[in-house]
Amino acid sequence: MSVEDYTDYKGAVMLWKIIPPFLIVFGTTGNTITIIVLLQKRLRNSPTSIFLATLAMSDILALTTGLLRQWIKYTFDVDIREDLTVSGCKFHWFIVYVVTQFSSWMLICVTVERVISTFMPHKRRVFCKMRFASITVCAILCFLVSLNAHYLFGYGNLVRNVDNETELERCMPTTDSYAHFIIYSWTWIDLCVFYLIPMLVMIIGNSMIIYKVFDSQRRSRRTVAPTSNPSVTAQRRKTSSLTVLLMFVSALFIICITPIVVYPIGEPYWKEGAPEHKVATMFLVETMANLLMYVNHSVNFVVYFLSGSKFRSEVNRVVCCKNITVIRQQTTVSRSGI
């Protein structure tokens, strides 16, 4: 029996055919709404809004480049990465890694901005200006572009001689040394950039924020009556809302991303000499890990809506305003037709 004949392999292919359309439609719609809401006049002057809007754009690119390619590959038997030109192959590898890593680093920016706002509010005007946020986004993008530029030079079509016959392998590392780098070195670099550094920053930063929030609440209970100062109560609610949002986003990131960064590290060792049925099982595990990663790119809108009161109210305001505009237009048309 070949790998394709095993139930695990067939189940993995079925997952690639069924789940991606839902994630792409839901994720693209939700992230588009997120961008529209965060760029509203009431929110767009906040560095956090800029970081989250940029994160939403990056998530859309991750879904439409990485996940869409997998769905097309297993549904229509067409691999847009391998069937494209050599330049298209290089660029696809490059863009998928850049946008997924970029999403992680936007979460770093949000966490650091909230830590500065919480612990050094007097420095917030210096480090949390819109210009500084824009420069930070551009600097991170330039860093990730440079880090992943090796894909633009190392991948291509590889000609092999097998049993005196020439075989063409598309979209492969063109040298043995580069292939060794991708398998045994790059997986660790990507692990640090894509997962470990963002995870550590979010855990440490969010722990600091939680400590500060509870410490501030404890002190305010001793010095100020909860109902005697409305501004204190409002600020406390705002801080709590942002803290809850960060907690959910960080937890979602860790849960969804951990499997896909752990699997590639062990894959070269697990696959070596493995029987066909084990390879099929590994493909199923890899599929579920990949889909879980794309879930993270798809559902941030739900997290923002459920845990961010300000975001939720802005969504309602935008939707209500649009509904009112539509009603007014329909009323105008009906009156002009009388």
Image (spheres, grey):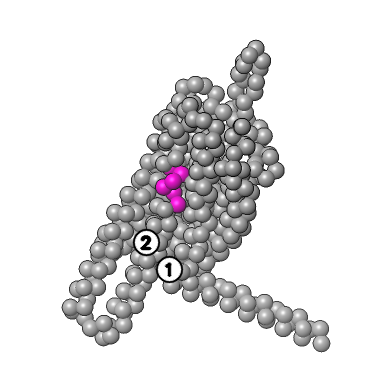
Q: Is residue 239 left or right of residue 70?
A: left
Binning the other alpha carbons within 10 Å of mark 2 as few (below 14), some (14 to 19) or many (20 upward) gives some
Q: Is residue 69 visible?
A: no
Of residues 325 and 215, the one nearer the viewer is 215
Residue type beneath disc 2: Met
Q: Quadrant of residue 234?
A: bottom left
Task: Give the residue at x 66% y 15%.
Answer: 165
Of residues 263 and 55, the one nearer the viewer is 263
Residue topped by disc 1? 307
- Is 90 located above or below residue 128 in the figure? above
Q: Is residue 331 left or right of residue 95?
A: right
Q: Is residue 147 left or right of residue 96?
A: left
Task: Give the residue at x 59% y 30%.
Answer: 171
Q: Quadrant of the N terminus?
A: top right
Residue type beneath disc 1: Ser
Residue topped by disc 2? 247
Task: Give the residue at x 59% y 34%.
Answer: 3
Q: Quadrant of the C terminus?
A: bottom right
Give the magenta range: 256-261
In the rendered structure, find residue 243 and report the number of the disc placed on it: none
Q: Secondary structure at mark 2?
A: helix
- Residue at far right of view: 338
- Is 327 located above or below residue 123 in the figure? below
Q: Is residue 221 left or right of residue 129?
A: left
Whether residue 217 appears in magenta in the rendering, the answer is no
Q: Secondary structure at mark 1?
A: helix
Of residues 126 and 297, the one nearer the viewer is 297
| Majority SS type along the magenta span | helix
Q: Pinpoint residue 291: horizontal percent, then vertical percent.
A: 53, 49
